[in-house]
Image: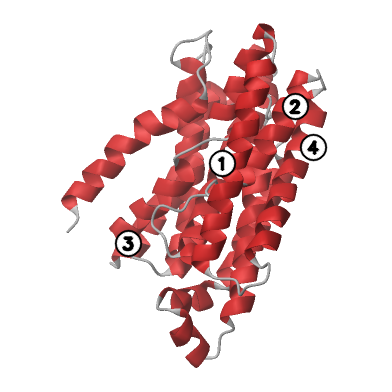
Amino acid sequence: MNRRLIIASLLVLAAPLSLGFALAHGSLNIGVAELWQVMRGGHDGMAAQVVLELRMPRALSAFAVGGLLALSGALLQVLLRNPLADPYVLGISGGAAVAALLSILFGLATAWIHANAFFGAMLSMFIVFGISRLNSSWTQNRLLLTGVVVAAGWGAVISLVLTAAPAAQIQGMLFWLIGDLSYATRPGMALVALLLGLVASLWFARPLNLFMRGENVAAALGENPARLRFIVYSLASLLTAMAVTLAGSIGFVGLVVPHILRLAGGSDHRFLLPCSVLLGGGFLTIADTLARSWLAPVQLPVGVLTALLGVPVFLYLLARTR
């Protein structure tokens, strides 16, 4: 059987298993039989409340955020033709972080924090896009350098906000910066964004395959590199903004998940993009479950777990691959 088909089939099976793992484990462990009854609507006790009202929204949010970050990372690595590109390299998360931290500083409600974070991400996207095209053609290097400089500027503002913030608000700010799904209780918009983003990116799978061989090759075979760059940048930025708005700045997922799939199954985007969604979503779901249950009742930032779990796996695959 084709290797890519095997990997894709395993990921399709693993995705619901990761969600089941998240629903069953926590401070109150729920058995498989009891979980099945809850999902069928045949159980109305405490287990049903825990699963349906607490764990399911958070698990779906974790899957959506992981899929969004992995998909965005795969797109940006093609756009910039840089293996170190990730969803945060262009300063999108920096703009969101500044807006979110200022909202926390002024004591705004959670809904306002999410809304302002999305606005900050969009503002950063337009700043990078506008400056990178100013008086010059839009190239990968110019876009990357602009994003890095804008991200550094946002980082300075973040340090200023953390320095000026009261001690009582520092922990919440740090959790948001590292990545936290504690308040991600409405995954609907993120799941819709993930589905639409995957459909849109798959529509451009063939042009992306050609773009990897170089802009001249893509242009010679009938593609428009400038239009493709704009579409990929806009799509990846919107996906990143949605993920950051829901869960803060969760690192590592968008950088390493596409690389793991490239090492395992190659760079064909008809395979890479949907598998990135499945692997990124499942990986973050499991990491968030461990983050909230490992030291319960204390909850760890999920960004810490993504690095602790993912780095050894990636280094092992890298060491085994020529």
Can you identify the residue that label 3 sits on? 265
Disc on res. 132:
none
Residue 30 appears in the figure: no
Dot 3 falls on a residue whose secondary structure is helix
Q: Estimate the spatial distance between the alpha carbons at disc 1 and disc 2, rounded to whole Å.
A: 18 Å
Disc on res. 152:
1
Three-letter residue code for mark 1: Ala
Q: Is residue 22 left or right of residue 316?
A: right
Rendering quarter of residue 248: top right
Q: Is residue 290 left or right of residue 2?
A: right
Tell me residue 131's x, y (percent).
67, 60
Contact check, label 1 and label 2, Cβ < 8 Å: no
Looking at the image, is mark 3 or mark 2 earlier in the sequence? 2
Q: Estimate the spatial distance between the alpha carbons at disc 1 and disc 3, rounded to whole Å.
A: 35 Å
Name the front one of labels 4 and 3: 4
Can you identify the residue that label 4 sits on? 115
Q: Nearer the viewer, residue 274 or 253?
A: 253
Rendering quarter of residue 58: top right
